[in-house]
Amino acid sequence: MKAIIMAGGKGTRLRPMTCGMPKPMVPVMNIPLIEHIIILLKKHGIVDIGVTLMFLPQKITSYFGDGTRWGVRLHYFTEEKPMGTAGSILSASSFINDTFIIISGDCITDLDLTKAMEFHRLKQAVATLVLTREENPLNFGIVTTDNSSYITGFLEKPARGEVFSDTINTGIYVLEPEIFNHIVHDKPSDFSRDLFPALLDKGYPLVGYTSYDYWSDVGTVESYLSTHCDIFNRKAESVFGENKYNNNIVVGRSTVIEPTAKINGPCLIGSNCYIGHDAVIDSYSVIGNNCFIEDQTSIKRSVLMNNCSIGRGCELRGSVLGNKVRFMHYVSCYENALVGDECVVHERSIIKPNIRIWPGKVVDSLSVVDRNIVWVSRYKPELFSQDGLTGTVNVDITPEFASRLGSAYGSVLGQGKSIVVSSDDSNASSLFKYAFISGLMSVGIKVNNISEVPVPLSRHAVRMLQAAGGVHVKRNSESDDRLEIDFFDENGANAGISVAKNIESVFYKEDFLRCRARAILDINNISDFTGYYLGYLLERIDTGCIRKKKCPSVLVVSNGESMLTFIHNIFEGLGITIGGEMLVNQMDPENIQNAEHILHADLIAFIDCSGEKLILAGPGGKVIDENLFFLLTSYILLRSIPGCTIISPMNMTSALEHLAIKYGGAVKWVKPSKHAILKELMKTDIYSGNINQYMLQFDATASLAKIIEFMCRHKTTLDNILKFLPSYHLRHNSFLCPFDNIGKVMRTVLSQANTAKRLYGGIRISFKNSWVLIIPDARKPLLHIYAEGNTDCESELLMEKYIYKIKGLIRYCSGEQKSQENY
């Protein structure tokens, strides 16, 4: 007799275990499922075996070859497209010339096939279906038989109200060759759903052989683990031999187990493994081949496939790890979690029960993984970066994520608090915003929705409405597929690190507050906030001066169509004429300097779609860089408010101090980040008075209006204003420095330079008329160096000197670390 093993299944319910292998190749007790079936067939004298393939066929053919190693003859038949269980065997029809067996290649069974074949011959049926009893038959096909074992009906995967029997179809059949005459050739056909019911309707005799031998379809992670337990408990021991597990512990060749390790049977440890000191391999665990288990690790009721590396102090409880998975120290992985091939989970992370991590993912240190990781390549414990919260739409940032984030933020603020929510005009931003609002409302937060406005208006609304905070959702300026979410404090500044950490803590722990139904508050929709903002500017812009004097010709360029419309409406209300508008895909002034519009404009203003960043260019399109723009706005502020204090990042040119002193002002240095500057500015009432630093540097629309007003009042041009600004020779460079070495390098620089001072997270080395500043990057393994001298040449020499010096320190630290590791 011959047999056909159906081995084309993808095993979608076992993903991500089956992302890189067909389900028949999933290992049980360290050998593939289909190998168990081949051993069973050979045991019953069946050595001519056909194998139908579909998904990743090479994984099976390369492993088994022609079957000689197993004492069988294998013949492969590959489907070009899915044709169903019955349709899949059509390609093997030439292989069959007598009664044959069909068996699934992705189950575990010790079925007595000989008895099933004898029963088939006795009944002289065209098909015999092997049946078994199942306590919960909802995921299987139910079959009913009469007292003579003839089949009377089928029901595939019934609902709870349709369960009329606990007898199910195992997918194992004894068939006559004539069965091929009844399989439809031109469309998919399934045995239990199509072929057998059709034969029954035509009056062909179908019989059911009810077996009480062991059978498991290994369809879920739960059944995968329970199947291993069943084998350890000898429910299916006839498949493997009665005496194989008498000692309860099976250890493969060349495996090293330290004397202090504790091995509790029943368990299986593969070949060429290492089990470290004080490690515990507890009952019902399977360790694959070539696995490395470090000291003090505890593994219970878990399955590790081949080539896994588990760091010191890890805990695995009822979980499954794919091939080449690497756990760093003190990782915990809990019940029914499944980690795909080649994943890396870093120190002290926790993988919660029932989590699925797709192959090749990296989980950062201290993560609490409570959601499946499917698309993102790296899972980070920090929601927030230096730039706020960012992510890809419907990958990192989904409606479910947004709602949970809203609940977390609301829980941090507390029930009854009021916040401002806004977005840009993109559909993706609106989707996220309303999902976020639903989470806020579930906590009992009062939501002020000011609709679609630029970021400065959202900051303004937080203070005007005396809200406890605010959120603005916007698309990334470089990619429409990414969103950025800004969180504001009660002053409208970006929320601090402590707020971000509190949101992250509540988010990952899901420790959300939940209010009662009557505490859910209405949304306060404010649709006319742009009108209020215009009124605010009208009180602070001298429109009469602008109308009387000759207004410069202005070209406005933006990467947001709605931003251009917003500026047009505001400037129309202020009486400022816009000479032209240009919509671009990317905010890259250098690429459009030669545009015809630019050549005829007195002033070119590049305003990003969020409304915060303004880049200026003069006639001919010569762009003013960030440092010069800072000096320009500081000059206007010092001329408008003599004696004022400028808040400046510490990497700004020292020329700013000379400028401030000239006009009786002062400079207060802060950390070089947008958040640090805004935090300091927002301590004062930025909305009082006619002009302030916030307006000039963080509200692009107001800044442009104020610069035009200044030009009109003083009857000057941009080029003439720039002549009053001091020259400077500032240089900037950055280069790679491993995270592990940054602290050592900074400490060494601080100790070696006599004039070095720690300053807001960096080190400043001062000389007579020059300085060098070294700052670690907030997110990347980089060091930034700023150098300024009296001339360009002096600045370049300073930069070269310190780059050479610090790169030498990096090499020294890296070599020291390597020698310690070798030791």
Image (tube, grey):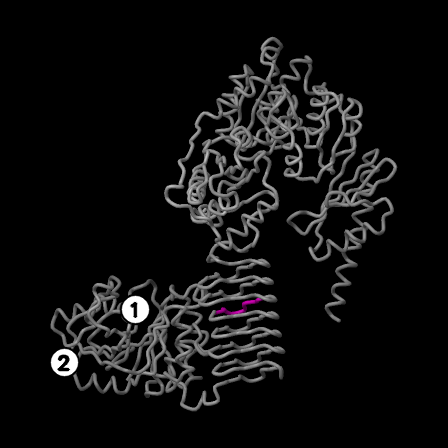
Q: Is residue 766 magenta-colored? A: no
Residue 161 is situated, as x and y percent measured from the top left of the image, at: 21, 63
Q: Amino acid at mark 2?
A: Asn
Q: Is residue 337 positioned above or below 523 on the image?
A: below
Q: Local crowd at mark 1 within 10 Å, few (<14), some, or many (≥20)?
A: many
- Where's the N terminus, which quadrant? bottom left
The residue at which mark 2 appears reads as: 147
Residue drawn at (45%, 36%), measured in percent from left and top? 447
Q: Hey, which quadrant is residue 223 in on the image?
A: bottom left
Which residue is denoted by mark 1 in the rendering? 88
Q: Dot 2: within a 10 Å radius of its alpha carbon, few (fewer than 14), some, or many (20 or more) residues?
A: few
The kind of secondary structure element at disc 1 is: loop
- Using the numbered discs, state the Cα–Cα distance from disc 2 to disc 1 in whole angstroms: 32 Å
User: Image height check: is 390 above or below 342?
Assistant: above
Type of the residue with mark 1? Ser
Q: Which residues are magenta?
A: 320-327
* Secondary structure state at the residue bearing disc 2: loop
Extreme residue toward the left, this view? 203
